[in-house]
Amino acid sequence: MTRVVLVTTSPRVATGLLSAQAWQELTVAGIVLATESAAGLAGVLRAAGVEVSSLDDATPVALARAVGAAAADAGGAVVLLGPEGRHSEASQLAAALGAGDESSSLVVESVAGTWDLPGARLLDVVTTMDRLRSPGGCPWDAEQDHVTLAPYLLEEAYEAFQTIEDGDLEALRDELGDVLLQVAFHARMAEEQSEDVRWSIDDVAAGLVEKLVRRHPHVFADATVDSAEAVHANWEAIKSAERGGASPLSSVPLALPALTLASTLQRKAAKAGLDEGELSDSAAAFADAVDRYLAGPTEVSAGALLWALVAVLRSADIDPERALRARARAFRESSSPSH
């Protein structure tokens, strides 16, 4: 039996970096063959002193005939496959060579020359976004800026949020891809700015990692915690130090939905001991807000009523945004024509 070893590589790993197993196969191969799509790797190996013969990429059947003949003459062969579409190329060539066919005189094996680490496909996101934004790419993408894209960032986040409410993990995967697109898009546009304000997606990732490490000293340093509550308290203390004495409310984005905004402000203010008079969660305070609204329904009294209601719900550990959304969804479903 004659062995044919197919060496596959990842397009997300530098050309020429090969696994120990791949190098071992190269050292004992009767002949090393490279498809046209593996020309880059073949060049690197030739520079390292490995003799590589080129194959003309044709149909899988024609390619298999050439590989089979060369392997038979040399007593075995290693075939270098190109990184793009390497899985389909390997499977098609293996099938054409008769892999698994007991009547075949060839034994076909696959060896991973390189493989993707977790997160490697994020490199494809960066490459694709760069292609879309560059000259000759997409005209619509080329016209966008941070301001024109801003509404899509909110829209995609809300769509992802809805899939979580729906419990649809398949849809969540797709929607998170849309959120990731927004991150990649904004980062790509930032690379085009003047040098004093320019940054890239690598800077975004580096800043995130630094923040996670800094705020998790119980994981990356010598801090000790004994509960999730202690982790949260430590996180808030670190954030407070990062703010340099600024109000803990200054970091709450006013773009939040109103109920979430009110709940977040109240929660942070309560933890910081700010203005307890505004944060009463008693039934009496809520009843007083109701009376004042009924006595004079205005935007101010309505806001005070909703604020008091949020305080009461928060004290009962009820998320007012989630509660109202659930009620709205139930109303929509009960009011649909099918009902």
Image (tube, rainbow, N blue to C red):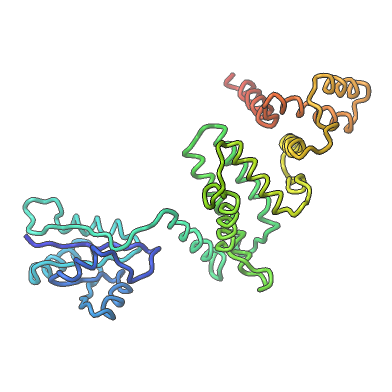
Would you place residue 334 above or below residue 24 in this image?
above
On the image, which quarter does residue 81 sit in? bottom left
- Residue 186 on image: x %, y %: 62, 59
Q: Looking at the rendering, in which quadrant would you find the N terminus?
A: bottom left
On the image, which quarter does residue 314 sit in? top right
The residue positioned 49% from the left and 58% from the top of the image is 125
Q: Observer-nearest residue: 127 or 245?
A: 245
Q: Observer-nearest residue: 236 or 176?
A: 236
Q: Observer-nearest residue: 337 or 168?
A: 168
Count the marks: 0
- Residue 90 on image: x %, y %: 25, 58
Q: In this view, does 284 lie to the left or right of 101?
A: right
Q: Is residue 47 left or right of residue 200?
A: left
- Residue 145 on image: x %, y %: 67, 61
Q: In this view, does 211 lie to the left or right of 94?
A: right
On the image, which quarter does residue 266 sit in? top right
- Residue 201 on image: x %, y %: 56, 62
The residue positioned 76% from the left and 29% from the top of the image is 310
Would you place residue 281 above or below residue 80 in this image?
above
Q: Looking at the rendering, in which quadrant would you find the C terminus?
A: top right
Would you place residue 31 above or below residue 208 in this image?
below
Q: Is residue 253 left or right of residue 338?
A: right
Would you place residue 338 above or below residue 136 in this image?
above
The residue positioned 28% from the left and 81% from the top of the image is 47
The residue positioned 49% from the left and 64% from the top of the image is 127
Q: Observer-nearest residue: 258 or 308?
A: 308
